[in-house]
Amino acid sequence: MSLPLREDLRGIEPYGAPQLDVPVALNVNENPYPPSEAVVAEVGAAVADATRSLNRYPDREFTALREDLAAYLGHGVTADQVWAANGSNEVMLQILQAFGGPGRTAVSFAPTYSMYPEYARDAMTGWVVGHREDDFSLDVDHAAAVVSEHRPSVVLLPSPNNPTGTALPLTTVSAVSAAASDVGGVVVIDEAYGEFRRAGTPSALELLHETPNLVVTRTMSKAFALAGARLGYLAASTEITDALRVVRLPYHLSAVTQAVARVALRHADELLARVEDLREERDLTVAWLRAEGLRVADSDANYALFGTFADRHAVWQGLLDRGVLVRETGPDGWLRVSVGTPQEMAAFKTALQAVLTCAPAGRREEVLQ
Ligand SMILES: *Cc1c(COP(=O)(O)O)cnc(C)c1O
């Protein structure tokens, strides 16, 4: 029989990066450092404690966790300005459920995070993409023009951008927020990689108090090395967090999730200590790729977009054949590599050199400037 599947979902494959079992996985921007045994023990104890009352539904408002997240964010953010869900991807879907919908539009600027159009589709929201410049920065006049033409109810801007690593200056965030405010829209600055910013790169949290239509999203999946726990969150005005409470499923954050996230926040200093190592390794990787004659986007994140290749799939496959999985994403000709441990990056460099030596014809536009 033919299923009553939505017309716009027919023939669509579920999206996701390949989950391959490889020695060196540098494809989904995970933190390569697992939690320490001390954190493992405390999480274990907290989960055991939560288990003693798993016959009851969890705190629907996850009040204690919201307080902890607000304290972590600082910038005067209060617990009722915080919202969380199972990964910032769920947070994003809830934003579109509340502020998108039929007859409405969400806007981003390519290259941008590949999941956004999926959430727009799932929330029956129109999807429009403007463009970024050749250096992946966002031109404010172009952004404002796209916003005033398409009148989006939601603008989605990753900063640092995925897949390019480009962070937005606060002047750009302000200008896009003002343009969106003129058409009654909210602006989401997705700071999934916010903790990896280079020194001197500000967070959009600084603008929160003066920008009522601004939402700043974060996640524990990347810097906190907690991708498996599924905890994403945001800071925004209480009008916005109250709207999200309307569309969330009841008890969407399990007692176990809440307990694990709270232990991780208590150990923020320890978990984030590795961020400094990863930022250094990122800068070394970018410099190395450039020294190899490749183009590399400036990165404020834990990955680097590099290229360009006449046949990027061949380079991706060549790396995979040598046990190194990177991501085939971004504009044609580019590949993205996540920053791993020094050992993993050494394996990546050896493999890439081998691939480029075997197939010199696969390499083009060798120098950025
Ligand atoms: C990884 C990532 C997220 C976070 O996803 P989670 O659902 O929190 O694991 C959000 N936005 C961007 C741009 C990302 O790359």
Image: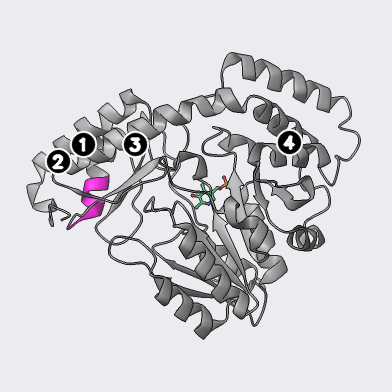
Q: In this view, does 324 lie above or below 191?
A: above
In-image side of 117 versus 73 (left or right):
left
Task: State whether residue 126 appears in this view.
Answer: no
Depth check, front residue: 42 or 206: 206
Q: Which amino acid does label 2 sit on?
A: Glu
Identity of the residue drawn at 63% across and 46% down: 87
Regarding mark 3 in the picture, which secondary structure is present there?
Answer: helix
Looking at marks 2 and 4 on the same chain, the residue that comes earlier in the sequence is marked by: 4
User: CA gap, disc 2 to disc 1?
Assistant: 6 Å
Q: Any atom of ligand 1 within 8 Å of the CB at mark 2?
A: no
The numbered mark at residue 288 is: 1
The numbered mark at residue 94 is: none
Looking at marks 1 and 4 on the same chain, the residue that comes earlier in the sequence is marked by: 4
Q: In this view, does 331 lie above or below 217?
A: below
In reply to whether residue 331 is colored magenta, the answer given is: no
Regarding mark 4 in the picture, which secondary structure is present there?
Answer: helix
Identity of the residue drawn at 56% across and 33% down: 224
User: CA gap, disc 3 to disc 4?
Assistant: 29 Å
Look at the image and give the residue range highlighted in magenta.
310-316
Residue 282 percent location from the top left of the image = 34, 36
User: CA gap, disc 3 to disc 1?
Assistant: 10 Å
**How many residues crowd mark 1 within 10 Å: few (<14), some (14–19), many (20+)?**
some
**How many residues crowd mark 3 within 10 Å: few (<14), some (14–19), many (20+)?**
many
Return the residue at label 2: 292
In reply to whether residue 314 is colored magenta, the answer given is: yes
Looking at marks 3 and 1 on the same chain, the residue that comes earlier in the sequence is marked by: 3
Tell us which disc is closer to us: 2 or 4: 4
Q: Do the residues labelled 2 and 1 touch (CB within 8 Å)?
A: yes
Depth check, front residue: 124 or 367: 367
Residue 343 percent location from the top left of the image = 32, 23
Identity of the residue drawn at 54% across and 32% down: 225
Q: Is the magenta stretch mostly helix, strand or loop?
A: helix
